Image (tube, grey):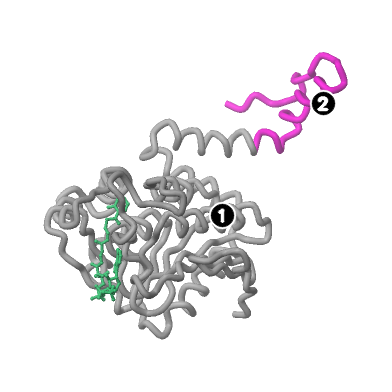
Amino acid sequence: LEWQDCSAGYHDIRYHKAEGIAKITINRPEVRNAFRPQTVREMQLALADARFDEGIGVVVLTGEGELAFCSGGDQRVRGDSGYQDEQGTHHLNVLDLQREIRSCPKPVIAMVAGYAIGGGHVLHLVCDLTIAADNARFGQTGPKVGSFDGGFGASYMASVVGQKKAREIWYLCRQYDAREAEAMGLVNTVVPLQELEVETVAWCRRILEHSPMALRALKSAFNAGLDGQAGVQELAGNATMLFYMTEEGQEGRNAYLEKRKPDFQRFKRNP
Ligand code: 2NE
């Protein structure tokens, strides 16, 4: 694949596009791709760019190198109330990014080589799909390092792997290899490390053959039950979008602009 380098202006991430795929790579291999507030902010910007780029149909999230996808929050900049940015403000802005990954109307795929640990594990978890290399290792560390993610990190995890396993993962802080993760339903497939990107691109290409509207409706439908009112809002937003695309919806707008009474009589009342 001929990736177009769109990394200009980014420091902590690299950003590429090719054939309808956007790839966001955390580029801090010296700390196993741990994120600091700036890393998260840049990921948010790239994700927003991919969302609004009509040419993009799938987003891939990954980490630089073969050793780690992401090792969570950078403990070196962890202040007393969050992760400290350049201005000295403390953040947990990765929680915003998690919501943005879930509400992105395009599938987001985690491509995991090496460690997906702590907040980095939750990042792969909230992606729609995870393709793991055979060297991938998964786990939470919160209770060991004085942290926890009781949001998607706990409740969504329980809906993916079940309550018992989710509690085990958090209470014991063990690491799980790629096969164990696959057996738990935490990842979709495990491939040899050398084939990780090729296989991920093949999954993306297959998704790109399919109806964008069906995919976005399905994603919001999968989210709806779990995400409460925000989930229903996403699903309903798609209904509104589809309604705007009908003659019936457009009749209301046209009548308003033409200062006349709308004529909805010609539209069918489906049973
Ligand atoms: C990821 C893991 C298991 C890798 O182990 P290994 O043996 O392959 O590498 P090593 O030697 O531990 O790490 C290499 C370098 O990366 C740094 C290390 O300190 C080390 O630096 P030097 O000694 O070479 O200078 N490094 C790795 N992870 C880092 C991190 N997260 N922050 C800062 N530096 C890091 C192993 O490194 C590991 O267990 N890392 C820590 C994982 C962790 O506890 N993450 C934080 C969880 S809390 C969280 O992410 C969070 C949350 O719970 C809620 C909201 C937001 C965030």
Label of residue 45 in the image = 1
Closer mark to the observer between disc 1 and disc 2 = 1
Residue 259 in the magenta stretch? The answer is yes
The image position of residue 42, as x and y in percent, is 52, 58
Direction from residue 155 to residue 271 in the image, left or right: right
Going from N to C along the chain, the mark reached first, 1 or 2, is 1
The image position of residue 21, as x and y in percent, is 58, 67
Which of the 4 image quadrants contains residue 246?
Answer: top right
Q: Is residue 142 above or below residue 245?
A: below
The image position of residue 121, as x and y in percent, is 31, 60
**Residue name at image x 53 percent, y 66 percent:** 11
Direction from residue 164 to residue 212 in the image, left or right: right
Seen from the viewer's position, the closer of residues 48 and 202 is 48
Which of the 4 image quadrants contains residue 62?
Answer: bottom left
Q: Is residue 263 visible?
A: yes
Give the residue pinned by disc 2.
254
The image quadrant in which ligand 1 is located: bottom left
- Secondary structure under the numbered disc 2 in the rendered image: helix
Residue 99 in the magenta stretch? The answer is no
Label of residue 247 in the image = none
Look at label 1 and name its amino acid.
Answer: Leu
Q: Is residue 41 above or below residue 237?
A: below
Extent of the magenta region: 242-271
**Residue name at image x 49 percent, y 53 percent:** 41
Q: Is residue 150 above or below residue 115?
A: above
The image position of residue 99, as x and y in percent, is 44, 45
Quadrant containing the C terminus is: top right
Which of the 4 image quadrants contains residue 129?
Answer: bottom left
